[in-house]
Image (tube, helix red, strand yellow):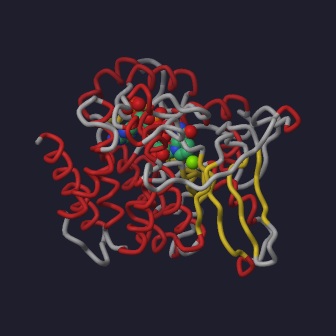
Amino acid sequence: MLGATGSIGSQTLDIIAAHPERYRATVLTAGTRVDRLVELARRFRPRLAVIARDELYGELRRGLEGSGVECAAGSEAFAACVEAPEIDMVLTATVGYSGLEPTIRAIRAGRDIALANKETLVVAGELITGLLASSSSRVFPVDSEHSAIAQCLRGEDPATVRRLIITASGGPFRTWTAERMLTARAADALNHPNWSMGAKITVDSATMMNKAFEIIEARYLFGIDAGRIKALVHPQSIVHSMVEFTDGAIKAQLGVPDMHVPIAYALGENSRLADAAPALTLEQMSSLTFEQPDPERFPCLTLAHTALERGGNVACTINGANEVAVDAFLHDRIAFPDIYNIICRTLDSVPFVASPGYDDLVATNAEARRIASELISH
Ligand code: NDP
Ligand code: MG
């Protein structure tokens, strides 16, 4: 479990705790929250606990003294832990670019992936697709929209798929004017109407960058070109996504907004786990509504098509700049609309690479971060 201390990590551990006969966490990792990692490792008894920050090794070791859990720290240990032979499946629930290297190593080692970390497919969609083609590793989507699409596609002929319709809650600013969005602060953006998630993805939902990333993620997970993937705002977050077929039929997956369902479906290799979440009582809902997203107020959404049309390292640049800009917004260093502005200005400055290999992506990410940081500090 990459990112055991996070929102997806904790919900996955709920499932593991409820089903010890099925699942065991053999490796737990965290970025910085060493106390929480110690607590989880003492409770779930993995073979190994890894903290990505080198300097936290001593604290981890002391915390786990006498527990029998092995300890490791640092970026190499974090990326290498996915290769352990006893692992059947790697849950990628770390945030942002940090998921890239361990995901690549997990695929090379033939481990199945429960993919929450969508940024990996944003940064390196072509590279990951290529690696998967020559590996025994399979990818099971954790993202609720992609899990919904995978469920709708079950038993269908891929040639009959007309388009994918990815639903979006619209986030906390769905009804805000552009003027009001100028005044949005981190606390407003973190106040998501339907989902409780980590801070970075919650801000991405507020800008709708999350939906842009999900379009890119769908492009690579399902091999469908971007022109046939549409985002549709659905404020109730009950319809998790849909597939439209060539005969005009549309299949949707519905449920309460609860990540335990897609997580359990991925852990079960696309099979259902009883009582993963409370049942949906449609009769208690007054309405399910749908509306077109507004690219004027949510310009980040348009970056999905920018990234997929231009290709190369463009999505990697967008992702790197977005990570830096979101962090700056969370620390009150830039205004909400500046997230998009910083990304566009970074895109103008990072050299284009048409067919990036891993090293090009590493360089692009570093350059995008450097430029975005510079733009923010000026
Ligand atoms: P959180 O912020 O709640 O958790 C992130 C986890 O990753 C934490 O365990 C954190 O460790 C760890 N982490 C962060 N940075 C690093 C790093 N540089 N190196 C190693 N570990 C790191 O995020 P979420 O659980 O919300 O999201 C995780 C991923 O899942 C994201 O890619 C997100 O887009 C995706 N996702 C999340 C959904 C949700 O409902 N939350 C829904 C769909 C997708 P620590 O806290 O100890 O520093
Ligand atoms: Mg999602």
Q: Position of residue 223 (x, y in %)?
A: 57, 73
- Is 262 situated left or right of 89 in this image? right
Report the residue at 36% width, 55% height from top: 101
How many numbered marks, from 0 up? 0
Q: Report the front residue among 90 and 151.
A: 151
Which residue is pictured at 67% across the width and 46% down the height? 262
Q: Position of residue 30 (x, y in %)?
A: 41, 34
Image: 42 above or below 228: above
Using the image as rendered, state which of residue 38 and residue 242 is in the foreground. Answer: 242
Question: Looking at the image, which is closer to me, 301 or 145?
Answer: 301
Location of residue 104 (image quadrant): bottom left
In the picture as drawn, the residue positioned furthest to the left comes out as: 378
**Position of residue 89 measured from the top left corner of the image (x, y, whole percent):** 58, 51
**Quarter where residue 23 is shown:** top right
Residue 27 visible? The answer is no
Name the residue at the right extreme: 283
The residue shown at (29%, 78%) is 354
Left or right of 369? Residue 50 is right
Q: Is residue 200 in view from this perspective?
A: yes
Indicate whether 286 appears above or below 340.
above
In the rendered view, tell whether residue 23 sits above or below residue 160.
above
In this orientation, which residue lies closer to the viewer: 273 or 330?
330
98 left or right, relative to 360: right
In the rendered image, the residue lying farthest to the bottom is 159
Residue 26 shown left or right of residue 288 in the figure: left
Residue ID at (17%, 63%) = 349
Q: In what quadrant of the picture does the C terminus appear?
A: top left
Q: Residue 192 location, x and y as percent?
A: 53, 32
